[in-house]
Each structure stands twice: as C-alpha cells, then as structure tokens.
Amino acid sequence: MKNTNIYKRYRFPSEIIQYAVWLYHRFNLSHRDIEDLLAERGINVTYEAIRLWCNRFGPEYATRLKRKHRGYGDTFFIDEVFVKIDGIQYYLWRAVDQDGEVVDVYLQKRRDGAAAKRFFKRLLKMHRDEPRKIVTDKLRSYIVAHRELIPDSIHDTSRYSNNRAELSHQPTRVRERGMRRFKSIIQAQRFLGVHSAVYNLFNLGRHLISAKIYRLLRLRAFTSWKSAAA
C-alpha cells in the first residue's frame, strides 16, 4: 500500500490528522484537550474521531520511524514495573540504551524466566545483534535470560547502576496518570509503542546542548516526523 492511500476516505486533511496524533503522543494531553486546541484554530472535530486517528495512524507512524531509526547503543539498561489494567497486575518491561533511547517496551503478565527470555528475544530482534553489556537489578529472571540467550554480554547488577532504566519509566507514569490508567493491555501496548518512538525522535537532550544546536536537531526531528506521517 502506498503512503498516500492511508488517508483515503478520511474527511479531514492529512495535515490535521498528523498534527492531532503528534500532539497526543508528544505531550500529556487528552483527546478532549486536543479537540479544544483544534477548535481554537477553527477546526471542529470530535475527541472520538481524534481517538480513532491515534489508534489507526499512531502505530503506522511508529513503524515507519523505527524502520528509519539510526540504531541503538551497545549497552542496554533493563527494568520492569507493575502496571494495573482493569484490576489485573501486569509488568511493563523496558530497555533503554546508554543515550536514553527506548529500545523496546513490552507488557507481560509475569516477570519470571520465561517472560525475561521473551523480552530479550524482542531486544535481539530489534538490535539485530547481542549488546556488549546489559544492566539490570538482581531479579533472577534476568540471570536466566542472560545465561541462555546472551552469555557473552557483560551483565552488570551492581547497586544504583540501573538508575537510568528506573528513571525511564517516569514519562510513562505521567501519561498513565493523565489517561486515568490504561483501559486494556491492547490499548496500553499500542500507546506505549507509539509513545516510545515519538519520545526517541524528540528526546534531544536540550539541557546538554546549545540553543542553536537544539533548534537544528528539533528541525530535523520535525522533518523525520513529517516524512513518517506523509
């Protein structure tokens, strides 16, 4: 399917759809918030239509962004946190590299050895090679997955070394509160996959670079977004 066909039969121009999807995944905004922002610009669209746009086009944009991603570093920081969905406790597994790029996020019901191996297999597929080093806490499931799947990688479980992965959950927690919790595992996985791709694109380390360089990188990020959403 050609890129130009994905907007076929949609009443609103593709630019409006792209903008709404970007707002939702880039900022802590609800569909109703975006409805009001568009209304202020004279664009009358319901929050339900915006929700459908995000569900339909968000994963498509994320897939294109990941396809063009320049690649991840050689060190993975891995952690898992619990997420309650519809009264059931799940575990959100997350891996980031040494630059803070989100390598993958994956919801599972357990955090045992089988779950850890499942997540590691996803990481290997995403990275296309074994990482030089992984950093985790002392959960035994990681030891099992490391031993069976990537025994040649360095495995660091020292105290405080995994703070990067633990801190990487914060943006997700902020969105989870703003959305008043995830409604289903399908909805959560879909949102998290798109959110991580958009986060990677616009995670420019603003506090580490000059304003001039930041504006240049931001311009490149916008160009990449427009290309993915074209």
Image (cartoon, rainbow, N blue to C red):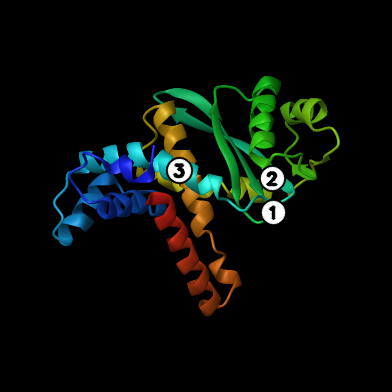
Taking 28 as reference, is 186 above or below it? Answer: above
What residue is shown at x 39% (from left), y 27% (from top)? Answer: 184
Q: Is residue 169 visible?
A: no
Do the residues bearing badges 3 and 2 touch, measured as CB atoms within 8 Å?
no
Q: Which of the two labelled residues, at mark 3 and mark 2, occupies the earlier sequence position?
A: 2
User: Badge 1, how many Cα within 10 Å: few under 14, some, many 20+?
Assistant: some
Check the image and report above or below for 51 versus 18.
Answer: above
Residue found 47% across the figure and 58% down from its top: 224
For the residues labelled 3 and 1, the Cα–Cα distance comes to 21 Å
Residue at the spot of label 1? 98
Give the mark nearer the N terminus: 2 vs 1. 2
Residue on which disc 3 sits: 194
Mark 2 = which residue?
77
User: Percent position (x, y) of residue 125?
Assistant: 66, 34
- Please tell me the numbered disc located at residue 172: none
SS category of the residue bearing label 1: loop
Q: Earlier in the sequence, mark 3 or mark 1?
A: 1
Q: Quadrant of the N terminus?
A: top left
Circle 2 residues within 10 Å: few <14, some 14–19, many ≥20: many
Which of the 4 image quadrants contains residue 52?
A: top left
Q: CA distance from mark 2 to mark 1?
A: 7 Å
- The amino acid sitting under disc 1 is Gln
Give the percent coordinates (x, y) of residue 142.
74, 31
Labels 2 & 1 near each other (Cβ < 8 A) = yes
In terms of image quadrants, where is residue 127? top right
